[in-house]
Amino acid sequence: MNIVVAQSGGPTAAINASLLGVYKQARQWPDVNTVYGAKNGIEGILKDDLLDLDTYLSTQEAQTLLRQTPSSFLGSCRYKLPSAASQPTVYETIRRVLEQHDIGAFFYIGGNDSMDTVDKLSAYFAQVGCSIQVMGVPKTIDNDLVHTDHTPGYGSAAKFISTAMMEMIRDAAVYDLPSVLIVEIMGRDTGWLTAASALPWLNGEQAPHLVYLPEVPFTADAFLADVRRMQKQTNTVIVAVSEGVTLEELSAFQSGDVDAFGHKYLSGIGKCLETLVKQKIGCKVRSVELNVLQRCAAHFASDTDLTEAERVGAAAVEAARAGATGQVAMLQRTGDAPYAVTTACVPVCEVANHVKYVPRDWINQEGNRVTEEALAYIRPLVMGEPALHTENGMPRQLRIK
Amino acid sequence: MNIVVAQSGGPTAAINASLLGVYKQARQWPDVNTVYGAKNGIEGILKDDLLDLDTYLSTQEAQTLLRQTPSSFLGSCRYKLPSAASQPTVYETIRRVLEQHDIGAFFYIGGNDSMDTVDKLSAYFAQVGCSIQVMGVPKTIDNDLVHTDHTPGYGSAAKFISTAMMEMIRDAAVYDLPSVLIVEIMGRDTGWLTAASALPWLNGEQAPHLVYLPEVPFTADAFLADVRRMQKQTNTVIVAVSEGVTLEELSAFQSGDVDAFGHKYLSGIGKCLETLVKQKIGCKVRSVELNVLQRCAAHFASDTDLTEAERVGAAAVEAARAGATGQVAMLQRTGDAPYAVTTACVPVCEVANHVKYVPRDWINQEGNRVTEEALAYIRPLVMGEPALHTENGMPRQLRIK
């Protein structure tokens, strides 16, 4: 029999390490003939767009490059699988394509939405008596999946954010005049990534002075009071804010601004707070949006993250080999000093469509800092850097064409 | 006698390597007792705010960390030295402070505006018969100084830009639908940094498909035609654009603020083009501003750049020891295969207030790509990575307090 693996959702620096883990472990499974990759997630299965991964990944060099290549080697999709009751033909198409290729197990590497696909598909196969196994391999920079200590992809994003923050702290402090720097960090619903911006405290930095997560209420008045208070202590106030914090003034700000073409100009919380500081405090202020590099900056990935991402992929294959289906491979922290993890599988229905928030007691009372416990949790996940293979001064990458 | 060194202008990843070069070479100069650092550039001299650098830089560990620390260890300023005729007291203050500390030579590490300070101060000292030597050490990510093959700081910024571009190319290509990614790159007047975004072509990439430098005219109509043409060839069109390109529609996005030198703050070309694509083409579009990380991302600096930055600092000290004043240490390329440089000094009056543009024949006829010659020039400057010392997963940094 054969197996197929696909990648879904937003890119991370570690999702290809999980692909590598699935591929290598599947090559150790004697029953498996061909390891297929489906292009663009579940869409590639619906379109019967499968690749024989031996063509791309069989050499040591290709595997080394795959591990250091960000984003999804196989491409991705945002396809939301409809319910089997409403659109049975979608499920029948998936089953037919998989059976035509003699697929015994399907591995889906992705975040919350992808786990929903694993859940629905495995439930459907169970219902119709189809023996194809469906397994989830988690990835998301957001770290918002339940039942896992953390998600592969988070550690690398956290490492880039904390390192960029360290560098922006140095950058912002060079002029001898009052200024405010606002750094907008990804995370629509949860503050895991923004919390990582406080790791520079472990290296003796005072900044970022204020850290705002979406888990707690946020108001313009409290923000301005926080900034004014910090300005009494330091010339350069540095603020880390999650893109997901909600602010009444944000909608007014967004709907009020009109661009050069007469269209409403949508901008994020960082730009909004920059305007607020400019208007209400009047000092020099800059906002920086870390943007997509948070999820694709493989040039300074966490080696711990890459190693764990590969392990999780391999663990899903081992579980499938032992008969599992409808499950997700997870990381369990078994030690803190030294840090250690093991892998385990849990039923996907317990994971899909749930969200893991930063615990309230990892955020200070005032809601403008994170606690030492939060940093102790994040720290081991950002440790280590891969030895990069470069070409013309840039990290080499593996790509399909 | 003693010497003093100061840093000025915008941060780079390599300006501290030049400080290290000055310090180490000055420690080899038998006549020099104390090597002072002035805080916040020329302002630190005006305020008599000098540090004995032995306190901070005498150990091997400190020197290693200084080399990998971005931004200005001594702080910076944007102070514009008035003319000696209009404000003689400023010059008299500088002379008095320097003489009080028995300063024989002053080394100023900075960009174009700092070279203007070196020019004015050395001319004043010559005029009043003061023997204090004044030497310039160039740095700027913009690479816009004349009489040097390139400026320290440019290589590291170029390396970060090209690497980030490689990663964003992977990131942008994962979805199987038409999209446009616009990457806004620093460079007020010159396109050197934007040209570096095309280095991924050397690694086999098609992207960035369109590269716009401020050296050539830019119009919305030509831009939209370029994008539409590229969309026939690829799903994901990636555009690199300098913050300095001029566009009639841009004016409404700009604040109109100017800094101490009369430079207009530029922001918004990326957002402006994003809006243009949304309105006129209607596909998925995102703009990314690489922002301050271009000048401070020391975590992936060019080792070639750091080494040369140190050499240039040392060369300025050697020239001063041989009697030079009113000069700037420069890099001359002496070979291409293999790449090699040597240092030399030129009179600062030939450098200050001149701008080196990207040659027109390094840009294609249509003004939307750079040529192979441009890439051949940039490539050696981004080679190599320093072996980083890390702490808690982040590069360690040296700071005054």
Image (tube, coloured by chain):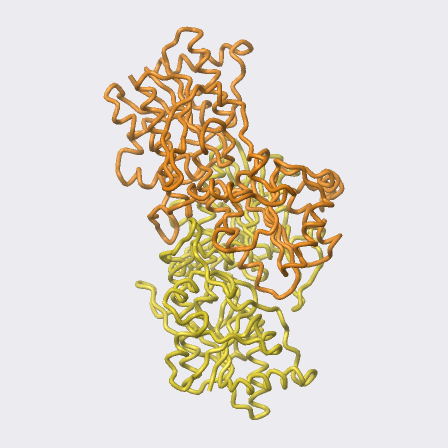
Chain colours: A orange, B yellow
Q: Quadrant of the C terminus of chain A?
A: top left
Quarter of the image with the N terminus of chain A in it? top left
Which residue is drawn at the image coordinates 46% and 30% (left, top)?
A76
Say which of A140 and B100 sits in front.
B100
Name the quadrant containing residue A229. Answer: bottom right
Query: Residue at 41% of width from left, 84% of height from top?
Result: B321
Query: Which residue extends farthest top?
Result: A128
Q: Is residue A90 visible?
A: yes
Rendered location of residue A255, percent (x, y): 74, 39
User: Would residue A103 be visible to someone looking at this image?
Assistant: no
Q: Is residue A178 above or below residue B22?
A: above
Residue A284 percent coordinates (x, y): 67, 58
Q: Is residue B91 above or below residue A261?
A: below
Compared with B331, B322 (above or below) is: below
Name the residue at the bottom extreme: B129
Q: How many numbered tags mark residues here? A: 0
Q: Position of residue B90 (x, y in %)?
A: 65, 82
Question: Where does the image place residue A292, in percent across and percent down from the top left?
Answer: 52, 42
**B334 or B262, which is in the foreground?**
B262
Residue at image coords 41%, 37%: A14
Which of the two residues, A230 or A16, is positioned nearer the viewer here?
Answer: A230
Q: Seen in the image, is B111 located left or right of residue B67?
A: right
Please name whichever residue, B206 or B268, is drawn nearer the observer in this view of the structure: B268
